[in-house]
Image (cartoon, helix red, strand yellow):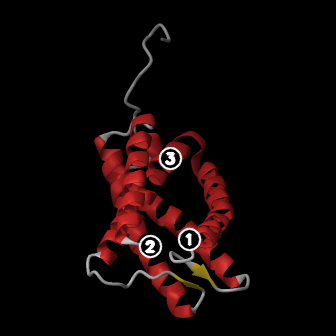
């Protein structure tokens, strides 16, 4: 991945974040929680990438020159996962822990094929080793990213059921 591609992808995820903030009616506290969750999950994700590289499960070339590439990669990863926590916060508000569990299961199922498709389309970004181990490890990484980020979101923003939504219905129901 070139620096230009990384900046472009990060900007696209930043636009997605703005859209999700708008549609979830995120308060400043929830937005701060989502950013904290994104930062924590970004650290976890970077660790998963490094561990997968070291174990030979995949190859993601993140250690390159120029020296600003690695922090830029972390920033892009953190921004890309931040919208997830605004969604999980709403799911937890509406469906409780069962809704979160279903969401985590869905992410674990659709995340690895998404990564494999990216790896096929852009082999310079990522290459998976053969076998089922990289697939399962990638699914576990997705689970960790969602769970860790949601926990940090909850620590910062508080429990979703305790927070009031921004807009309220009037007494007439409109």
Nearest the viewer among 38 and 70 is: 70
Task: Note whether residue 38 is visible.
Answer: yes
Check the picture and name the quadrant holding the N terminus.
Answer: bottom left
Find residue 146 and report its horizontal and vertical position in percent: 52, 62
Q: Residue furthest top?
A: 172
Q: Which mark is residue 87?
A: 3
Find residue 164 and report its horizontal and vertical position in percent: 40, 34
> Which of the marked residues, 2 or 3, is nearer the chain's N terminus?
2
Judged left or right of residue 140, residue 82 is left
Question: Are the two marked residues, 3 and 1, in contact with CB atoms closer than 8 angstroms?
Answer: no
Say which residue label 2 marks.
Answer: 1
Q: Nearer the viewer, mark 3 or mark 1?
A: 1
| Distance in Å between CA atoms under marks 3 and 1 | 28 Å
Task: Note whether residue 37 is visible.
Answer: no
Find residue 33 and report its horizontal and vertical position in percent: 35, 53
Secondary element under disc 3, as helix, strand or loop, is helix
Say which residue label 1 marks.
Answer: 122
């Amino acid at each position: 991945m070139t620096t230009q591609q990384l900046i472009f992808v990060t900007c696209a995820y930043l636009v997605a974040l703005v859209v999700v903030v708008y549609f979830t009616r995120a308060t400043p506290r929830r937005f701060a929680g989502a950013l904290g969750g994104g930062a924590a999950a970004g650290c976890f994700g970077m660790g998963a990438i490094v561990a997968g590289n070291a174990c030979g499960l995949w190859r993601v070339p993140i250690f390159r020159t120029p020296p600003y590439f690695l922090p830029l990669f972390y920033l892009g990863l953190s921004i890309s996962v931040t919208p997830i926590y605004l969604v999980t916060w709403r799911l937890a508000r509406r469906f409780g822990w069962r809704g979160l569990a279903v969401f985590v299961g869905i992410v674990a199922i659709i995340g690895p094929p998404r990564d494999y498709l990216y790896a096929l389309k852009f082999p310079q970004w990522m290459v998976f080793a053969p076998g089922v181990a990289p697939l399962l490890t990638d699914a576990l990484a997705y689970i960790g990213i969602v769970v860790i980020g949601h926990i940090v979101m909850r620590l910062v923003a508080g429990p979703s059921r305790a927070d009031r939504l921004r807009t309220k219905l009037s007494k007439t129901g409109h």
